[in-house]
């Protein structure tokens, strides 16, 4: 039941925020903050109490999930409200709670009109994301996956920044929505085809994740279905040819929207690949892995190169996200235990560093009222501690040892090497580009010739504590990533085993064909 | 000869006709708007109740009508939408300077026609039902005839509808010439030895006639103008009851008559479906008038629904039922809001998109209803529309009609653009321009309550669809 509450708390909190607007602007903010902290604390308590290093035994049902909740929903098609939590979902929900709270805090001053409705949307997004991380019924998963787009759309369209000419925020929001919804429908088709394939072999309609694992299918059919899932996740991750929505959405979303988008929404895609795409179609994924890794490498280079050429701070950070998600994609499709652990660490680390950079650029915008790099420069020493924090997060983002990002990227590369050495080499080379764009941020914003003499107001305690806690987290997980690895060990091992079994299966099939 | 069971099955139709006569006599005696609405509503409610009572009878076949699960469902939907239209028109016609009471008379006659149509088992009843449904609609569409657009809508619908009827009649004649039967079981029997060229032509012409009513592309040209020009409640009826009834009769004859099951006929139907869902969505993209936009959107939705006709198996009937219900609830909600904003009658309806700018900040609940309706039309999860879309895609996947599935996905993606456009308009900052607004106490009036109820239903069917799904899974054609 606690899982249901994890989903419901943000939704209920959101409704309260909306109605509480009549008592002033402050009330919705405090309610929203309290709601997100409640989610965070509940998750941390669950983390503290639960055992997430479950041993894998012969009967997976018995010990598969740490907490589970299950009621029938639409019996006609065997659709259940089936929520379950394991180490992976636990970490991501904790992340959601934390970044949700940060999103509320960072919009404390930025959002001043229709505060209640803003927080309604913000909390609905987070509720939807928690739902995505907890559902293991494919129908329910899809519902949450699509549902969270609606409040995100409102967030960008109503509180976003107007971009350059011809790029209004509504246009951007619509683009974001159509990209993700259309690709989501492909996933729905794939889900349904999978369910009917399962029905054809077993005579039972079910959308349950565990029961659909290992559905017998022909090779080509599985490949098509895998593509359906992959495209849906690839749009959201984003993988390079499908990334068109991301820079615009980031540039025009309010700070809270960017934080959620980079910190959590992109992670739902990686989660979907780890949880659904690989385990459901191990053989097809194995066959697809070279393509996916190639796309990952392209993404790393493309993101880094374009980031270096941007004039808009938030667009720049958005492109670095594309680059980092390239690593995640490579790690996932390498499929070794170490690479998968690296993926999880990198996901968490990127959430912190990207959220930090977006919050900083929001604070910068509140002071200098522009996001254009050409109009900044020489800000070091003119905005109190802000440049120092920027340096910290830029260092984290380029993967400096001591930060969690380093651990993540290192583990991904280390784990990928035995499987795909060339990919590893190429990806390592791209680290140079990461240094390039990271230094460009520092150089063009904070060093270089100053554009004016004005001294801007320093960070207040709200901004200061927000940044400080993020830096602390980045360093903490940089020195003690074992906490994340231990919690998700069972999951990464399981995915790894399925994926290797897929390789074996594919090999047997190709042998059989060769004969 | 009619038996007692037949009479019981016929009761809902008889009750609606009796209400129509009562209303007519009442008007002749004394004009009273409120009383007329009350009598119509009570009559429709009793008919609805009797439908539930006699729904237990099982399949009943009278010489010209058949009462099976689908009929009960169709009649129920026609009655519900007539009820909603009656309450909307009460608010809408409140300020109308001319005679107001006759509108309900027309509405009741059209409802009776729709009910007959859903039960039609004989080409004569099919024709009778269709005409009884259409004739009053001409009057309803042109009801506010001092407004040029309304008159234009009525006349346009009259002329084109008459043409379609001519096709339909010619088709029926050809079918009769080939088989010597007019009842559907007889037709099926007559074609058992093979479908002759005349029967095929006849079937095709009947299809054209019905496709016109459903505004399947390329027979859709009347739709946008009529939707835009007609008064709100009349268009609501046209978009819901009329289309639902015509769809059910189409489903019935396509399932029954073997001429539709050949490969060529299937390809033709699939082509129509694909064309309708794609072109309907594309044409809606640039509309600046919400009623026109909803018109094109309804074209697209019937494109999706045609998938059920193409596949035509057990699951197809279930899918058709589910989709019709979700479409009905959603469309009633959307048109309900438009009608409430245009009432009381004051010339043109509030149908330009800019009338809706910032509605959320003036009338949050009314805007919320329209938002939910738009999301439901777009098929976003946790609204009724998603369940419908889920079923349609499931049907396409099950039958492995990948082209149609691709069409649905593409159509939905295109459709999002204009649904979102309408939705976001509701939340944008208010401009200083003159605007239309609902009366302050809209939420307490019958129309307002109905709209709120519909919104709750949309959410409820999205969140907890199990009862509806269960009901529909029991559905079958006789």
Image (tube, helix red, strand yellow):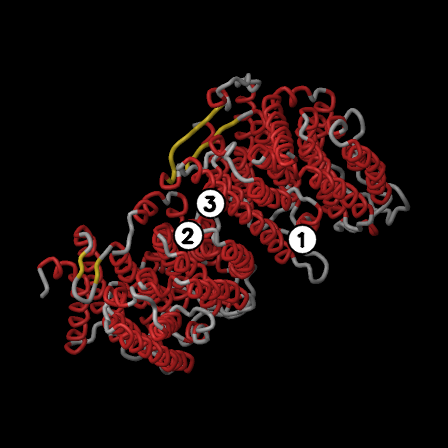
- Please tell me whether mark 1 sits on a helix, a strand or a loop: loop
Q: Mark 3 lies on which chain?
A: A
User: Which numbered disc, 3 or 1, marks the residue closer to the eye?
Assistant: 1
Marks 3 and 1 close (CB-CB < 8 Å)? no
- Residue A258, percent across and down? 66, 44
- Residue A393, percent across and down? 76, 34
Compare residues B409 and B425 and report the one nearer the observer: B409
- Distance between the alpha carbons at the discs numbered 2 and 1: 36 Å
Q: In which quarter of the image is the N terminus of chain B?
A: bottom left
**Which residue in the protein does label 3 denote?**
A19
**Which residue in the protein does label 2 denote?**
B388
Compare residues A250 and A230 and report the one nearer the observer: A230
Disc number for residue A161: 1
Q: Quadrant of residue A499?
A: top right
Compare residues A298 and B270 and report the one nearer the observer: B270
Compare residues B195 and A437 and report the one nearer the observer: B195
């Amino acid at each position: 039941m606690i899982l249901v509450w994890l989903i419901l708390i943000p939704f209920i909190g959101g409704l309260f925020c909306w109605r509480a607007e009549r008592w002033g602007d402050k009330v919705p903010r405090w309610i929203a903050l309290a709601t997100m902290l409640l989610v965070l604390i509940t998750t941390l308590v669950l983390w503290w109490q639960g055992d997430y290093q479950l041993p894998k035994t012969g009967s997976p049902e018995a010990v598969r999930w740490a907490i589970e909740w299950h009621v029938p929903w639409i019996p006609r098609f065997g659709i259940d409200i089936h929520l379950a939590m394991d180490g992976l979902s636990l970490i991501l929900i904790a992340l959601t709670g934390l970044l949700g709270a940060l999103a509320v805090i960072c919009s404390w001053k930025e959002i001043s009109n229709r505060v209640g409705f803003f927080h309604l949307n913000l909390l609905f997004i987070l509720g939807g994301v928690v739902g995505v991380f907890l559902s293991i019924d494919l129908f329910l998963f899809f519902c949450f996956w699509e549902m969270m787009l609606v409040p995100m759309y409102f967030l960008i369209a109503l509180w976003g920044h107007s971009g350059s000419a011809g790029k209004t925020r509504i246009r951007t929001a619509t683009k974001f929505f159509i990209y993700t919804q259309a690709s989501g429908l492909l996933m729905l088709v794939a889900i349904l085809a999978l369910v009917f394939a399962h029905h054809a072999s077993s005579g039972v309609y079910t959308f349950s994740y565990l029961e659909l694992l290992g559905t017998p299918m022909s090779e080509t059919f599985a490949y098509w279905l895998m593509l359906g899932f992959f495209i849906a996740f690839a749009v959201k991750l984003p993988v390079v040819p499908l990334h068109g929505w991301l820079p615009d959405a980031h540039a025009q979303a309010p700070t809270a929207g960017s934080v959620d988008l980079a910190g959590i929404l992109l992670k739902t895609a990686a989660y979907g690949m780890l949880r659904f795409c690989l385990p459901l179609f191990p053989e097809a994924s194995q066959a697809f892995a070279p393509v996916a890794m190639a796309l990952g490498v392209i993404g790393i280079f493309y993101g880094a190169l374009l980031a270096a050429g941007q004039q808009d701070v938030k667009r720049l950070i958005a492109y670095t996200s594309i680059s980092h998600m390239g690593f995640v994609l490579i790690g996932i499709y390498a499929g070794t235990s170490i690479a998968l652990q690296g993926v999880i660490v990198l996901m968490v680390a990127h959430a912190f560093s990207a959220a930090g950079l977006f919050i900083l650029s929001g604070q910068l915008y509140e002071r200098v009222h522009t996001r254009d790099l050409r109009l900044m420069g020489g800000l070091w020493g003119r905005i109190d501690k802000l440049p120092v924090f920027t340096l910290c997060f830029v260092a984290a983002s380029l993967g400096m040892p001591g930060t969690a990002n380093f651990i993540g990227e290192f583990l991904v590369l280390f784990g990928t090497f035995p499987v795909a050495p060339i990919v590893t080499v190429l990806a390592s080379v791209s680290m140079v580009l990461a240094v390039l764009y990271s230094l460009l941020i520092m150089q063009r914003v904070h060093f270089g010739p100053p554009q004016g003499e004005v001294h801007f107001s320093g960070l207040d305690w709200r901004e200061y504590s927000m940044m400080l806690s993020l830096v602390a987290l980045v360093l903490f997980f940089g020195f003690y990533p074992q906490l994340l690895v231990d919690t998700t060990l069972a999951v990464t091992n399981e995915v790894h085993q399925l994926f290797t079994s897929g390789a074996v299966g594919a090999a047997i099939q190709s042998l059989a064909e060769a004969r | 000869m009619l038996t007692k069971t037949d009479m019981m099955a016929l009761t809902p139709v008889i009750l609606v006709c009796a209400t129509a006569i009562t209303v007519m006599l009442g008007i002749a005696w004394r004009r009273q708007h409120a009383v007329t609405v009350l009598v119509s509503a009570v009559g429709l409610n009793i008919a609805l109740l009797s439908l539930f009572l006699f729904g237990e009878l099982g399949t009943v076949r009278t010489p010209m009508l058949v009462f099976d699960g689908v009929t009960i469902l169709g009649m129920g939907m026609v009655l519900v939408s007539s009820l909603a239209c009656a309450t909307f028109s009460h608010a809408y016609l409140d300020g109308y300077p001319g005679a107001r009471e006759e509108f309900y008379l027309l509405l009741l006659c059209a409802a009776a026609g729709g009910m007959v149509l859903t039960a039609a088992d004989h080409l004569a009843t099919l024709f009778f039902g269709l005409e009884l449904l259409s004739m009053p609609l001409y009057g309803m569409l042109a009801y506010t005839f001092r407004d040029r657009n309304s008159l234009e809508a009525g006349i346009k619908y009259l002329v084109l509808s008459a043409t379609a009827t001519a096709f339909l009649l010619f088709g029926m004649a050809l079918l009769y010439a080939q088989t010597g039967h007019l009842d559907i079981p007889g037709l099926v029997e007559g074609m058992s030895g093979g479908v002759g060229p005349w029967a095929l032509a006849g079937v095709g012409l009947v299809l054209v006639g019905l496709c016109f009513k459903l505004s399947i592309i390329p027979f859709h040209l009347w739709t946008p103008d009529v939707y835009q020009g007609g008064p709100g409640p009349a268009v609501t009826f046209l978009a819901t009851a009329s289309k639902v009834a015509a769809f059910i009769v189409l489903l019935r004859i396509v399932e029954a008559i073997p001429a539709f099951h050949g490969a060529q006929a299937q390809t033709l139907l699939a082509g129509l479906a694909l064309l309708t869902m794609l072109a309907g969505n594309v044409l809606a993209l640039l509309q600046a008038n919400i009623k026109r936009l909803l018109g094109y959107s309804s074209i697209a939705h019937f494109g999706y629904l045609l998938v059920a006709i193409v596949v035509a198996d057990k699951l197809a009937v279930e899918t058709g039922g589910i989709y019709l219900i979700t479409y009905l609830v959603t469309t009633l909600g959307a048109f309900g809001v438009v009608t409430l904003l245009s009432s009381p009658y004051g010339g043109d309806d509030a149908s330009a998109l800019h009338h809706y700018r910032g509605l959320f900040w003036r009338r949050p609940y009314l805007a919320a209803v329209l938002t939910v309706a738009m999301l439901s039309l777009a098929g976003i999860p946790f609204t009724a529309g998603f369940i419908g879309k889920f079923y349609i895609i499931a049907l396409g996947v099950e039958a492995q009609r990948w082209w149609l599935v691709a069409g649905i996905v593409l159509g939905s993606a295109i459709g999002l653009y204009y649904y979102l456009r309408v939705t976001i308009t509701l939340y944008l900052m208010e401009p200083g321009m003159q605007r239309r607004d609902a009366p302050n106490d809209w939420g307490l009036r019958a129309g307002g309550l109905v709209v709120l109820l519909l919104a709750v239903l949309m959410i409820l069917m999205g969140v907890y669809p199990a009862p509806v799904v269960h009901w529909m899974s029991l559905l079958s054609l006789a």
